[in-house]
């Protein structure tokens, strides 16, 4: 089942053929951006800059940029729905955008599904 990522009531892209890590509650897959993604792209480029890749495939992490990314990502107030519009309760949503350095097909998205047990959200603080 594919999913839509929503910002300000508009779909910014689609997660296609997702996989899941059930033990972690994380869904991930290729991300296909829509034209509306351009409005939030700068936030997700911060992540790419923060974790940067070198030509040898090694990564370097910039903790200050990573902290900034998480703050700005969370401030976007993104949401996820199924393709048919059913909401998916999430704890966080991320888009990995390495398109500048690795090409236009280098997008991935992931989100953590809120855990519900007997009607109680186990992740609520």
Image (cartoon, rainbow, N blue to C red):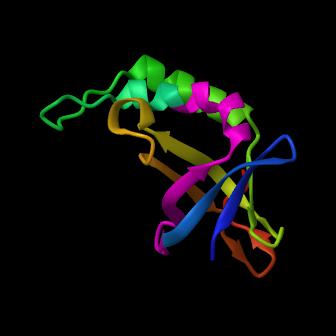
Query: Could you tell me which quadrant the N terminus lies in?
Result: bottom right
Q: Is residue 114 visible?
A: no
Is residue 38 or residue 88 the one in the foreground?
38
Whole-percent x, y for residue 80 in the image = 73, 58
Whole-percent x, y for residue 18 in the image = 52, 69
Whole-percent x, y for residue 45 in the image = 50, 28
The residue stretch that appears in magenta: 20-44
- Residue 28 appears left or right of 4: left
Q: Is residue 83 magenta?
A: no
For the view shown, which residue lies furthest in the right direction?
Answer: 9
Q: Quadrant of residue 60?
A: top left
Whole-percent x, y for residue 58 in the image = 17, 35
Report the residue at 67% width, 38% height from top: 37
Report the residue at 17% width, 38% height from top: 57
Q: Is residue 29 magenta?
A: yes
For the view shown, which residue lies furthest in the bottom direction?
Answer: 118
């Amino acid at each position: 089942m594919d999913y839509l990522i929503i910002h300000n009531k508009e779909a910014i892209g689609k997660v296609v053929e997702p996989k899941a890590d059930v033990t972690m509650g994380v869904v991930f897959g290729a991300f296909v951006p829509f034209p509306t993604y351009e409005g939030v792209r700068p936030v997700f480029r911060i992540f790419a800059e923060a974790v940067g890749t070198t030509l040898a495939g090694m990564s370097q992490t910039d903790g200050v940029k990573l902290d900034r990314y998480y703050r700005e990502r969370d401030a976007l107030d993104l949401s996820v729905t199924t393709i048919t519009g059913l909401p998916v309760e999430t704890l966080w949503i991320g888009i990995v955008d390495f398109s500048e350095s690795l090409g236009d097909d280098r997008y991935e998205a992931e989100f953590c599904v809120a855990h519900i047990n007997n009607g109680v959200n186990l992740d609520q603080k």
